[in-house]
């Protein structure tokens, strides 16, 4: 029965998939180059591939933040449980630790997943990374000993790493996108548009770029879905002990969200933020995927694909001028980015308050 607690992570993955599908093919679908059905099939396949092949790389950082905020069991918790079991001659303490770890992961993922689903329903491409971070910190604000300066400084340092990506990620994507779109527009657009097989070339280009972007989403985001269920101690303190399996389960959950409820956000990202052409839309996808790979590899943190694609779309729009960026829509998205960790954190804190007797 304890494995039923995994469904909160699967719900988080489904919610993430409904939101992040836009990041791979939003511009392709909105410009009419790729059909929506074709896009979601490619996304689903490549997200699972990215999660299976390289998704385990970001699990560690999420777990570090979770341990500091008393969500995941620490090595000290495991040692204490082992000592208690040795003294009692049974494994009761370890079983209780495993159950509590799974329950805390369930609570955090449920709070984050509900937040992402709400924002997806409203049509905002929010950050699953922010929602997970907010929910983890919300729990920690109640249960972690922030009065201890050592714990507080450690928690703030780790939170700072995650929060820094919320600025660097969209900014970096915007800069990369602006540079690439400017180069393509100035030196290659006229020649490309005159090609006899232009439509076929742009179609193939979108397919390849979207597949690459989808792979990067699986590589980057699967850790946001199941990392809290992974037993990094190797002592049976949580549900999943294989890092590759942990990431793959996350990828499958994301793919299900892509296939079932992703169209609303896909159209918001693709057409509402800025005026972009077919060609610049293709470059946007490349810029987003490059940013995810660079940031994820550099920092080892699952960065926000939603923030990357929004930054890339804005960067592409600015090539034509400020008037081609719909800052009214962008303002609403920015508000959602602030609301996402706040709402998830508040929900998690309230649940921690309501269940304090069990987890103390």
Image: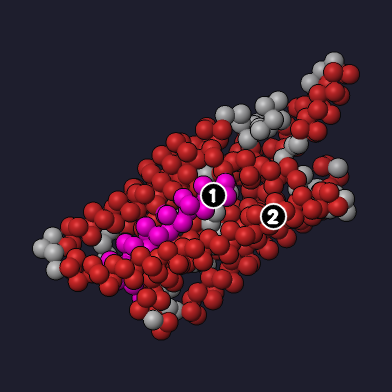
Q: Residue furthest left?
A: 196
At 35% from the left and 65% from the top, the residue drawn is: 180
Q: Is residue 311 left or right of residue 195?
A: right
Q: Which residues are magenta?
A: 275-300
Q: Badge 1: how crowded within 10 Å, few (<14), some, or many (20+)?
A: few
At 44% from the left and 48% from the top, the residue drawn is: 216
Asked where in the image residue 96 lies, by quadrant, the reply is top right
How far apart are labels 2 and 1 at the CA level?
17 Å
Q: Secondary structure at mark 2?
A: helix
Question: Which residue, given by chain and number where applicable, does mark 2 sit on?
Answer: 159
At 46% from the left and 56% from the top, the residue drawn is: 291
Q: Is residue 35 left or right of residue 357?
A: left
Please tell me the numbered disc located at residue 338: none
At 81% from the left and 28% from the top, the residue drawn is: 79
Q: Earlier in the sequence, mark 2 or mark 1?
A: 2
Nearer-the-camera pick, 240 or 178: 178
Q: In the rendered image, is residue 347 in sight?
A: no
Nearer-the-camera pick, 7 or 298: 298
Q: Main secondary structure of the magenta part?
A: helix
Magenta region includes residue 295: yes
Nearer-the-camera pick, 77 or 225: 77
Question: Which residue, given by chain and number where applicable, does mark 1 sit on?
Answer: 298
Query: Where is residue 214 drawn, in percent x and y?
Result: 40, 49
């Amino acid at each position: 029965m304890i494995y039923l607690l995994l469904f909160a992570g699967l719900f988080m993955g489904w919610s993430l998939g409904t939101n992040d599908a836009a990041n791979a093919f939003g511009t392709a679908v909105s410009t009419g180059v790729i059909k929506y059905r074709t896009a979601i099939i490619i996304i689903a396949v490549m997200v699972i591939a990215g999660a299976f092949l390289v998704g385990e790389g970001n699990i560690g950082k999420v777990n570090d933040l979770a341990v500091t905020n008393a969500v995941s069991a620490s090595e000290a918790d495991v040692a204490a449980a082992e000592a208690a079991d040795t003294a009692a001659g049974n494994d009761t303490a370890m079983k209780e630790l495993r159950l509590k770890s799974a329950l805390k992961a369930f609570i955090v993922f449920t709070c984050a997943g509900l937040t992402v689903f709400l924002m997806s329903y409203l049509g905002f491409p929010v950050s699953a990374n922010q929602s997970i971070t907010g929910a983890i910190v919300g729990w920690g604000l109640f249960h972690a000993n922030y009065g201890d300066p050592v714990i507080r400084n450690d928690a703030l340092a780790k939170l700072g790493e995650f929060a820094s990506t919320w600025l660097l990620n969209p900014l970096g994507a915007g800069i990369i996108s602006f540079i690439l779109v400017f180069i393509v527009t100035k030196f290659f657009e006229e020649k490309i548009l005159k090609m006899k097989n232009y439509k076929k070339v742009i179609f193939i280009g979108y397919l390849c770029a979207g597949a690459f972007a989808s792979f990067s989403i699986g590589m980057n985001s699967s850790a946001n879905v199941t990392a809290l269920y992974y037993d990094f101690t190797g002592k049976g303190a949580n549900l999943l002990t294989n890092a590759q399996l942990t990431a793959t389960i996350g990828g499958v959950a994301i793919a299900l969200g892509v296939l079932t409820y992703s169209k609303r956000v896909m159209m918001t990202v693709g057409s509402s933020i800025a005026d972009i052409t077919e060609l610049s839309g293709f470059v946007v996808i490349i810029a987003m995927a490059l940013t995810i790979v660079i940031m994820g590899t550099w920092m080892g943190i699952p960065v926000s694909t939603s923030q990357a694609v929004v930054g890339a779309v804005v960067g592409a729009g600015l090539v034509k001028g400020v008037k081609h960026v719909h800052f009214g829509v962008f303002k609403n998205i920015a508000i959602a980015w602030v609301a996402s960790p706040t709402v998830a954190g508040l929900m998690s804190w309230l649940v921690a308050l309501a269940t304090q007797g069990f987890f103390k």
